[in-house]
Image (tube, grey):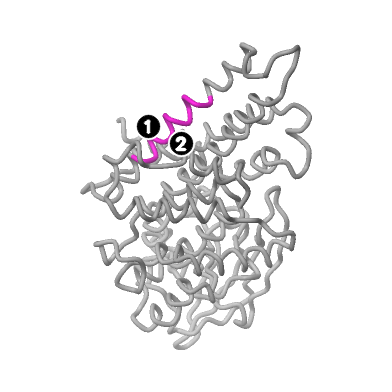
Amino acid sequence: MDATQATAADRPGLSSDDLTFFFDPLHTGVARLARAFAAAWRAGTGDAATETRAAVAALAAAGLTRWCVPEQHGGAPVGRPDGIDVRAVTLVREALGWADGLLDTAFAMQGLGSLPISLAGTPEQQAHYLPGIIDGSRLGAFALTEPDSGSDVASLQCSAERDGADWRLTGTKTFISNAGVAGQYVVFANADPTAGRRGITAFIVEPEDAGLTIEPFEVIAPHPIGTLHFDHCHVPGTRLLGELGGGFKLAMATLDTFRTTVAGAAIGMARRALDEALDRARQHRQFGLPLIEHQQVAAALADSATEYDAARLLVYRAAHARDVQVGRVSKEVAMAKLFATEAAQRIIDRAVQIHGGLGVKRGTVVERLYREVRALRIYEGTSEIQRLIIAAALR
């Protein structure tokens, strides 16, 4: 760990200590563990698949992947055995987002790719798949998006047909993180297209299943991602996940749990950008003065600091509500994801501007953040969808 990174990771901004009313004592421990891990993390130089495997192994060794699985299935003891502690996962993603976007994605997919099994799996499915999520030997994936079905989940076209006691899946899933490295894919397909979303059903697909082919592609912030093609892909009946026709509800429950944590990653990235911008503005001189003494730079930093703090308040409120409030908290979660991801984009953009030419030089921290943050405004509900959710709650 170099001194600069350690100091930045320990700054009050990357901490929940000033907002303890949103948290329980156990969150102090997980936040400090995640911040220490983030400060020590060094991204490698291998390909995205290799780096993802290394990241998951390191996260497991540090005990962080335990927070992706409910307590009753061997996860971290949080006092709510049948669910995920959203505040804990949000704090972990905040720290990991500060360190490295690929690291954050690796952690997030361990949760997103396994929670449907935790929520709806048979005891046999849970015993088979969940221990590997915790110890890092098995990587998860969540396959919902299709070429013509993104925000409109109910319109998905991937179909499931019975084949005796088993199933055959036909169709395409795309933008699937961990494509090519996952040990299992939670796939959503329609077993009764005439029933619309009431026919959507979840299945567990393994990489070796006959009829599955995987086509990797690259995105602006490298991580394993690709398209899954199902050509009458054979899935044993024992890998039907949950109830027939229960897939839409299961997918929404999973996304609702993890949506707040996306906002946690966003504020971690925003904090790192603010740290980098402050360091640059204090050290770099123009016209005889440090940049921070120039009025326009100071104003940009003030806007970033204010938006960062506002985002934290919305994110922590949403995570707290998701853990402890009875009833729906969709509006609070949507507000948190919308504001935090949009604000993080603005904060990082200002940091790039303060760095000048260095801000667009490949390999600098702010250049990496500029690429990493963009997808957060799209996945697990676009900003436009969050606005619709908020507006619906106001009616």
In three-dimensional space, the C-alpha distance between marks 2 and 1, rounded to whole angstroms, equals 31 Å
Residue 208 placement (x, y as % from top left): 62, 82
Part of the protein shown in magenta: 304-316
Residue ranking furthest to the left: 326
Residue denoted by label 2:
13
Q: Nearer the viewer, residue 277 or 254?
A: 277
**Residue beneath the point at 57% across and 34% down:** 275
Q: Which kind of residue does numbered mark 2 sit on?
A: Gly
Residue furthest to the front:
3
Residue 213 drawn in magenta: no
The one nearer the camera, 248 or 21, is 21
Give the amino acid type for the residue marked by disc 1 in the picture.
Answer: Ala
212 to the left or right of 143: right
The spot of residue 241 in percent (x, y) is: 41, 74
Residue at 54% x, 76% y: name it: 137
Q: Mark 1 — residue?
A: 391
Please give the name of the residue rendered at 74% of the width and 16% of the height, measured from the top-left corner.
286
* Rendered location of residue 365, percent (x, y): 68, 41
Tell me which secondary structure the magenta stretch mostly adopts.
helix
Packing grade of label 1 (10 A; few <14, some 14-19, many >=20) is: few
Where 270 sits versus 156, above or below? above
